[in-house]
Structure formats: structure tokens, C-alpha cells
Image (cartoon, rainbow, N blue to C red):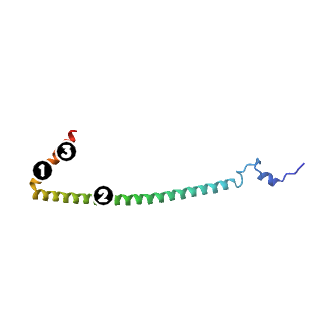
Amino acid sequence: MTATNPTTATNSPMSTQDHTTGGGTENFSTTTAKITSAAHTAVDIAAENLAHAEKALREARISAGEKVSETAQQAKSYSEDALATVTAYVGHYPLRSVGIALAAGFLLSALLKK
């Protein structure tokens, strides 16, 4: 017969002794605290990243709005310049302008009929 050491029998994975008694609830509390802490840290990091993303989106929206406004102002300026140029040309060359308008109308109507 072989003698069994009581300390090795209780630490063996095959032991039928209940591990929740004694230090078991303390280990559970420590594990729960670690998991809770890790979850809070993850949520804090996610919230910080979202705050950075929100700030970047707000800055991009402002920048895009400024660019659109600037482009609209440039388009308005170009159209005003073109109108002034056409008006000056028509004032200097009225008969030539009428001829150009008739030719453009004739070409346009020929293209649209097909």
C-alpha cells in the first residue's frame, strides 16, 4: 500500500474538495476587480478616442465650409469678370456679336434636332 500525502491530494486537479471555501471568494473578488478595472480603462480609452475623432470631424467640417465659401466666392468673381468681358465685347462689336449669336443658335438647333 502506498501512503498519500494530504497536501498533494487537496492540490491535485482530481481532488473532490470544494475550492470555493476559504480563499475562493477572495480570488473571485480580485478577478472581478481586475476585469472591472480593465473594462473601465477600455471605456475611458474609447471615450478619449471618440472625443479626438469628434474634434477632428468638427475641424474638418469647418475647414470644408471655409473652402466651399471660398470656392463660391471665386466662382462668383469669375462669372462677374466673364459678364463684364462679354458686355464690353458686345458694346464694341454689336454686329459681330449678333452674328456669333445667330451662328451659335443655328448650330445648337441643328445638334438638338438629331
Q: Assess disc 2: are there few (<14), some (14-19) or many (≥20) residues with their C-alpha within 10 Å of its C-alpha.
A: few
Q: Looking at the image, which is closer to me, 59 or 113?
A: 113
Residue found at x 51% / y 56%: 43
Q: Is mark 1 on a helix, strand or loop?
A: helix
Calculate the distance from the C-alpha at mark 3 to the C-alpha at mark 2: 33 Å
**Residue indicated by mark 2:** 68
Total numbered labels:
3
Mark 3 vs mark 2: which is more N-terminal? 2
Mark 2 vs mark 1: which is more N-terminal? 2
**Viewer-side label of 3, 2:** 3
Spot the residue most to the right. 1
For residue 99, which numbered disc appears in the image?
1
**Residue indicated by mark 3:** 108
Q: What element carries label 3?
A: helix
Q: What element carries label 2?
A: helix
Residue found at x 14% / y 49%: 101
Calculate the distance from the C-alpha at mark 2 to the C-alpha at mark 1: 38 Å
Where is residue 61 drawn, in percent x and y? 36, 57
Where is residue 113 drawn, in percent x and y? 20, 39
